[in-house]
Image: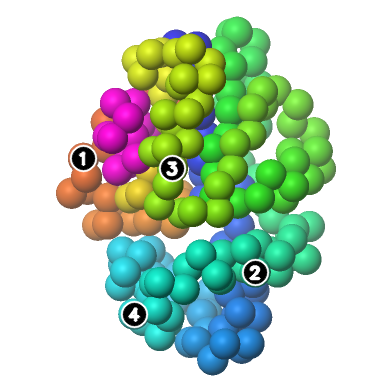
Amino acid sequence: MKYVIFDFDGTIADSKIVFISAWNKIAEKYHFEKMKLTELENIKKLTIKERCKMLNFPMYKLPIIIPQLYKFYRQSINDLELFDGIKDVLTELNKKGVNTAIISSNSEENIQLFLKRNKIESVKEIICSSHIFGKDKLLSRFLKLKQLDADEVIYVGDEQRDIIACKKTGIKIIWVEWGYDSIEVVQAEEPDYKASSPAEIMQLI
């Protein structure tokens, strides 16, 4: 194992409150449905397509909306929380000589600010794209750049689209249950491993 690649939102960072705040500003501007924190557990059980329908948001507008969403996200970035135990995982991997990277649809600026604020210096690479369904291309590019085989890498993520991207690239994935997609959404994709706590990530690796 040479690299452990992490998703950011919902895996490393607990960004639920920040995302809902950012989305509601977008919703107000474009007359979409707003979200409440109390609705989140039900929303986690929906696919992205179902969420878009619930929020009266046409999916074809994602490329236009995502960059604006992350600008609003940036305004509340100090409200972003680190999931308990994740820093310990990153530190332990570093001690064992395993490199860590982040691949995310968030912006590199947001991620760098968050890592700096939480004094996390062990992450070697941050690769970002605003295309939320293009993570398989980022993973393939990462493997080529680092001259790695798929079995030298494992991915840690929380969403159905993470699992699909890993299947396309032949990378095994640890799905974490504390993120944005519930087991009802991801189980059909059959993630390789499941973790109910950050400590379990280390056990699996």
| Quarter of the view holding residue 151 | top left
Residue 150, image x and y in percent? 36, 19
Question: Label for residue 135?
Answer: 3
Residue 105, image x and y in percent? 54, 50
Which range of residues does the magenta coloring cover? 163-176
Scheme of colours in the image: rainbow
Q: CA distance from mark 4 to mark 1?
A: 25 Å
Q: Amino acid at mark 2?
A: Gln
Of labels 2 and 4, the one closer to you = 2
Residue 83, image x and y in percent? 60, 44
Give the residue pinned by disc 1.
Answer: 190
Mark positioned earlier in the residue sequence (4 or 1): 4
- For the point 49% across and 53% down, the residue is 131
At numbered mark 3, what does the secondary structure look like: helix, strand or loop? helix
Q: In the picture provided, is 13 more to the left or to the right than 43?
A: right
Give the residue pinned by disc 2.
Answer: 68
Cβ–Cβ under 8 Å for marks 3 and 2: no
Of labels 3 and 4, the one closer to you = 3
Give the residue pinned by disc 4.
Answer: 53
**In this rendering, is residue 89 above or below 44?**
above
- For the point 74% across and 47% down, the residue is 109
Mark positioned earlier in the residue sequence (2 or 1): 2
Q: Is disc 1 surrounded by few (<14), some (14 to 19) or many (20+) residues within 10 Å?
A: some
Q: Amino acid at mark 1?
A: Glu
* Residue 165 visible in this rendered orientation of the protein: yes
Front residue of 197/135: it is 135
